[in-house]
Image: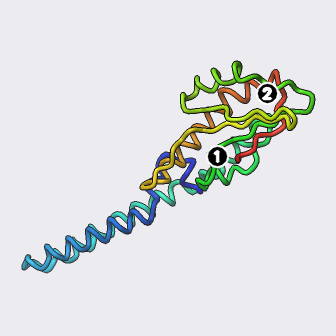
Amino acid sequence: MNATPSRFGVWTDITAASVLAGALLVCGLFVVRRLSDSRSLYVALALAAAPLIVSGGFSIAIRGSREVVVSWLASLPFPIENLNALLAGVSDGIEIIFEPGTDLPSRAVLQPKLEEVSDDLLLVKERPEEQLLEVRLGVIDSKRMPLRTNHQRWKRLLDVVERVLVPLSKTLPIRQVRIA
């Protein structure tokens, strides 16, 4: 989950690095058989190890990204619950829960503000009896590189919270935001 907040998180994917390292090793060993220089084996092994070393290096470099997330959460005027679901890539929606007695913003008011952030954001459901609005972040999962779409979803959440929800909370008090 450290990878999601960082734009370099996709480079920490150990599975992709392992596949690339294996492919480089097979190709390298094929080439080594045809060469008479004994040092070529060491060159092939070093090239095959490079993706794993790069992946490990990026993992070490971004290990402090969770502290950035915690600092951001502490700066908000309302709590965000279940953020780990978004960071792990298993959720793409948010529920905005307003204080009791607050009039919910209408779709005509909120949807244009969401569209200023992205055309893919959608106010899905209004539940006035629960003081709740449900919003989809609109980032479609990538089956090949899920860390990339996890990061895109994280950036979309940041934009929605900072550009829409924080200003909205000044006029309509938000009790909490829940990742659903």
Which amino acid, mark 1? Val
Rendered location of residue 173, percent (x, y): 84, 28
Q: Which of the two residues, 150 or 64, is positioned nearer the viewer here?
A: 150
> Which element type, helix, strand or loop, lies under badge 1?
helix
Numbered-mark total = 2
Q: Residue at x 56, y 38 (%)?
A: 138
Q: Residue at x 91, y 33 (%)?
A: 100
Q: Is residue 84 left or right of residue 89?
A: right
Q: Which residue is mark 1?
A: 68
Alpha carbons under labels 2 and 1: distance apart? 22 Å
Which amino acid, mark 2? Ser
Q: Is residue 7 left or right of residue 37?
A: right
Q: Residue at x 60, y 38 (%)?
A: 137
Which image quarter holds the N terminus?
A: bottom right
Q: Is residue 28 left or right of residue 37?
A: right
Instruction: Please tell me whether residue 180 is drawn above or below residue 122 in the rendered image.
Output: below
Q: Which residue is mark 2?
A: 169
Rendered location of residue 125, percent (x, y): 72, 35
Q: Quadrant of residue 157?
A: top right
